[in-house]
Amino acid sequence: MMAKEQQQSKNEKIYLFDSTLRDGEQTPGARLNYDEKIEVARQLARLNVDIIEAGFPISSPGELKAVKAIAREVKGPTICALARAVQGDIDAAAEAVKEAEKPRIHVFLGSSDIHMQYKLKKEPDVLLEQAVDAVKYARRFTDDVEYSPEDATRAREEYLYTLLEEVIKAGATVINIPDTVGYAVPEEFGSLIASLRENVPGMDKIILSVHCHNDLGLAVANSLEALKNGARQIECNINGIGERAGNAALEEIAVALRIRQNYFPYYTDLNFPEIYRTSRLVSKLTRIAVPVNKAVVGLNAFAHSSGIHQDGILKNKETYEIIDATLIGGKAAQMCLTARSGRAAVSDQLKKLGFSLSSEQLETIYTHFLELADKKKEMYPEDLEALALDHLSTTEPLYILDYLQTVSGSKSIPAAIIRLKKEDGSTFEEVAIGTGPIDSAYNAINKITGLSIGLDSYRINAVTQGRDALGEVQVKMSYQDKSIIGRGTSTDIIEASVKAYLNGLNKLLRINGYN
């Protein structure tokens, strides 16, 4: 028997339940479109998480469609859909995951006095009966039903004992204890998990799970404390994104379990070398930057500026590093491509970055890759990733940039000339002035379209280092009651800004039915 197998035979497995596509997407500004959701789900399957909570199907027709596609196309992990404890929600969840290899329905209902009194406005006994009925109804569609008593850390323990006993009798196979508002502290949370195991009949027949929010910065600590007290599933998100201050970070939990096996005698089936790529993909698609000092995946996680630290690292990396960057696939970012790189090399790197492309998509990206590689001496995976995300839209844009010229300077009036081309080949050109070259360009685009598009936020960052770095611009735009995120990349910051604005504009126009 191999050493790893011997270790696993002694230890217990921890199931990693990834909620990036559900709770993570509830992060303000983090909306993913249909194709982006599927791309993230495929990467989560490569990461080998145990369960993917693909979404909340009742929330919109688009959400239902995306969860159905993930259930149909993504193999390996259990595919889970969220539902409130009402039949309509459960019907939608069942419809969404019915084609999955391993479907799960996740039912939730408030359990704290404050939720029952002010949000649900029902008596505890009535809600207990509703929870039981919902679990029984969900079991009609699948043998794998998870139940969550929302806001459990502020609920009365005696009520939880009774509630959980009854939903287990009704057929729940997973019981999840949510710290919905990030209220718990580790010792308290661990004690709650232990008391539930001791006082709820049937708890030994189900998987006990936890779902921790990070409002007090304790989500990971609470999750790990729960494991010590009997939880065997952790619900977490890539990069710790989620409502308000976020959720427990999957990568932090997994690496903590791996590095501190002497303290946590458990194992996961996670494919660790995919952690870095998954983090980067989620960050790019959700438009939520990873803080440079973020544990495990931040840019500074393996950086050393102190002379004393640098001296120690040169002598032995273990003096100041407890995590080897190769464990999470961090070294993959060092490979570079050039204009001489062929399609095979580009295709291989895109696959390593988690992209599944058709031959037509690869050809499109390769053409743009050559254009960019002619401007830059070296192309790093981050450049290629940004390029791919820029050109993977399945929706044909209404307007594309045909010509751009700007004027600016300390003694001149900022102005821009913009020429846009439509799908039918017609072109439109306008000149506008503004507070700067970017504002002028945006004003010219608004003159062409005849629309007054609001710019709510503008963010720019360098994808890689150096004077020839690829610049990435993200803008949040609004029109009438709709808002959207636009993104664009270029070695020219003004061009990247215009591309981002057009990307968002085209999405808004499609949403509003313009042709």
Image (cartoon, rainbow, N blue to C red):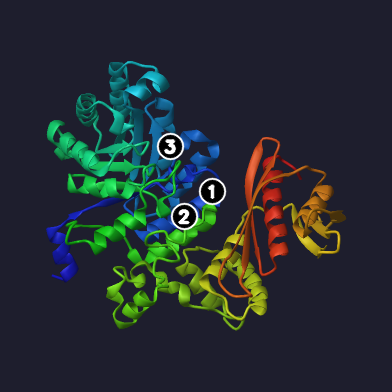
Question: With respect to residue 314, does 83 lie above or below?
Answer: above
Residue 222's spot in the image, x, y percent? 28, 45
Q: Amino acid at mark 2?
A: Val
- Check disc 1 and report its element: helix, strand or loop: loop
Q: Between disc 1 and disc 2, whose residue precedes?
A: 1
- Check disc 3 and report its element: helix, strand or loop: helix
Q: Is residue 443 left or right of residue 175?
A: right
* Residue shown at 14% from the left, 31% from the top: 199
Q: Amino acid at mark 1?
A: Leu
- Check disc 2 and report its element: helix, strand or loop: helix
Give the residue pinned by disc 3: 95
Question: With respect to residue 117, does 440 lie above or below?
Answer: below
Residue 160's spot in the image, x, y percent? 23, 28
| Residue 134: assigned label | none
Give the residue pinned by disc 2: 40
Nearest the eye: 68 or 157: 157
* Circles 1 and 2 in contact, beta carbons < 8 Å: yes
Q: Between disc 3 and disc 2, whose residue precedes?
A: 2
Where, by quadrant of the figure, is residue 197 drawn?
A: top left
Give the residue pinned by disc 1: 32
Q: Nearer the viewer, mark 3 or mark 2?
A: 2
